[in-house]
Amino acid sequence: MTWAGVAEIAAYMAIATLIAWPLGFYMARVYTGRPAGLDAVLGPVERAVYAICRIDRAREQHWTEYAVACLIFNMIGLFALYALLRLQDLLPLNPMGQSAVSPDLSLNTAVSFATNTNWQNYGGETTLSYLTQMMGMTVHNFTSAATGMAVLVALVRGFSRRQATTLGNFYVDVTRSILYVLLPAAILFTLFLVWQGVPQNLDPYTQATTVEGAQQVIAQGPAASQIAIKQLGTNGGGFFNANSAHPYENPTIFSNLGECIALILIAAGLVFTFGRMIGEDRFGKAQGRALYIAMTILLVAGIAIAWWAETSLGSLGLGTMEGKETRFGILDSVIWAAATTATSNGSVNAMHDSFSPLGGMVPLVNMMLGEVVFGGVGSGLHGMIVDVILAVFIAGLMVGRTPEYLGKKIEAKEIKLAVLCLLVFPLPILIFGGLSLVLPVGLAGIAAPGPHGLTEVLYAFTSTSANNGSAFGGLSANTPYYNLTQSAAMLIGRFLVIVPTLAIAGSVVGKKIVPVSAGTFPTHSGQFIGLLIAIILIIGGLTFFPVLALGPIVEHLMFIQGTLF
């Protein structure tokens, strides 16, 4: 660990914050329906979408209608992608003649991209046609990200409105998210990636002769456009199998920095959007700033621990480059690993399976916290607000008064729904992970013996349940058993959290705003930030520490013993 490395981490967070801050204010204008700067160009397109889809933009929805619309929209997309995967051998834009994808892998992939998980049990360049990459994966990168943003906006409206009955219109929120935020940002970032050398074409794969005289097939295709939205939408699914370690996905140190900032950018900006939508006065900004500080502390702490582990515990203090790109080195690999799992991105520029036991535990713990450290676009922040509800409830118990957040009283119904959100997330991890360690079909996919094999299984189901999609590696997961159990984990982790979150929004939107009094616990103070961080860590620790002790912690002790003796 060096001062130059500390300066790099500080510069990374500073650049991300400086871009996210104005972006957050811009997004607040998008969701409040005021001129957003692109109205003159995109307004007619937006109105055309409503006319074609017969959407009444003035009609708002009760939380149950909003939830049903969300589920229907995503299920239609899921089935459409499944059909595309099963029929891709009959469709055009398939220059390499890729065959139809098997039923279980098609289901896993369709669920993965519909839930913003982007877990990949396949190699993109060897399995998917150009049409599938563009109409399937890239389109879902937009729609799944927009879904998370819409749910967050509905929750924010629940807290900001006074005694209302509706939360907005899901279809309008999704349309505006795509047209005014995701699409313009993706176009700009695509141009940047093409400038850096990422391919964007429809040419057949290139047949090349190596220096040794061997024949090699070099894959290419419409990669830049998919990589741009995979980062901005916290999707993470790579065009190529090696993901962002591939030189065509991430060719230069500048593309590495740009992609690493992009994967956190919109998720971070939405925290400022939250503050502005709560209130444009100092109160609203302070609320957003408090959550941003809490998230930043947790992210930087994760980066620091992983950096220390990778530089101090590898090769007797010399660090380890196993599984890392020499173009990026240890620190850039660690920053990416921590940021991609603190958000719900899941893209990788290094092999997490090759990290030291504690270094590999940091990405795992980031996901086990519910990916609320910025998290997925929208989904991370609405998960953090659930943690906030629990924190103010505990604070209310301490001072002996009804807890409040943003002027809304938090009562039994909201607490029950918040606890439901927190309990749903670990269930598929512990149930499916446990089954995989005792059933022959699960054990068959584990190559590494002992605690490392346990960590590989634990990471796989944590990644899918948290809708992250990053792979630890080492687990042969492209089997009917893992494809089906991971599909179930992804659906549970996404939609059984979204529905109670919208129920919370529907519950608080009808409440009046209580004026601040001398007994109100301030939710923007340093004391509350500390309490919130403690609650997040305690919940994660109580839920997952026993299994972590059997996996990476035991492996770390074995690693130290083997190093010293």
Image (cartoon, helix red, strand yellow):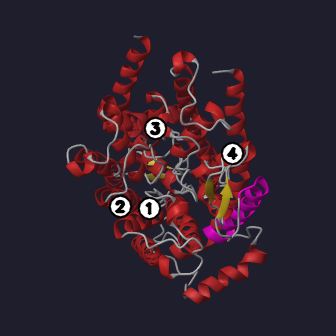
Q: Residue at 59% x, 44% y: name it.
A: 349
Mark positioned earlier in the residue sequence (2 or 4): 4
Question: Could you tell me which quadrant the C terminus lies in?
Answer: top left
Q: Position of residue 339 (x, y in %)?
A: 57, 42
Q: Give the magenta part as a residue range.
A: 177-198
* Amino acid carrying mark 1 in the image: Ser
Q: Residue under label 4, please give it.
A: 256
Distance between the alpha carbons at the discs numbered 3 and 1: 21 Å
* Amino acid carrying mark 3 in the image: Asp
Q: Residue under label 2, please give it.
A: 487
> Foreground mark, 3 or 1?
3
Tell whether 76 sits left or right of 496: right
Q: Position of residue 539 (x, y in %)?
A: 36, 38
Distance between the alpha carbons at the discs numbered 4 and 1: 25 Å
Distance between the alpha carbons at the discs numbered 2 and 4: 30 Å
Question: Could you tell me which quadrant the N terminus lies in?
Answer: top right
